[in-house]
Image: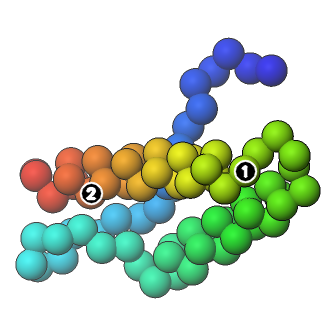
Amino acid sequence: MSDDPVQPATRHLTLVTATDGHAYIPAHDVVLLLRAVADGFRNLANDTDCDLNTAAAVIDLEADNLDCRAIEGTRR
């Protein structure tokens, strides 16, 4: 096991600031994100040590990371 901090998967998503000042994710990246969530649920489906609350907590952390990146990107 590594002592390196866990890096959010959403750090790789492209964020684009539109002319309206809002941050957007290209559709292709949204599709990849949704497929990753589905794959994660499939991986957890047979894991007796995990439940939907655990999966939801991970998704919340990823959403927080993405939200912070969007805020940071639109404040410039």
Which mark's residue is nearer the viewer, 2 or 1? Answer: 1
Q: Amino acid at mark 1?
A: Asp
Measured along the vertical axis of the image, is residue 8 above or below residue 18? Answer: above
Camera-side residue: 41 or 26?
41
Q: Amino acid at mark 2?
A: Ala
Q: Residues within 10 Å of mark 1 (few under 14, many from 20)?
A: few
> Which residue in the structure is indicated by mark 1?
51
Disc sitting over residue 70 in the figure: 2
Which of the two discs, 2 and 1, labels the residue nearer the N terminus? 1
Left or right: residue 25 compared with residue 59: left
Camera-side residue: 6 or 49?
49
Per the image, label 1 sits on a secondary structure element best described as loop
Q: Residue at x 10, y 52 (%)?
A: 75
Q: Residue at x 15, y 58 (%)?
A: 74
Mark 2 and mark 1: Cα distance apart in space? 29 Å
**In this view of the protein, can residue 57 be seen by the observer?**
yes
Q: Residues within 10 Å of mark 2 (few under 14, many from 20)?
A: some
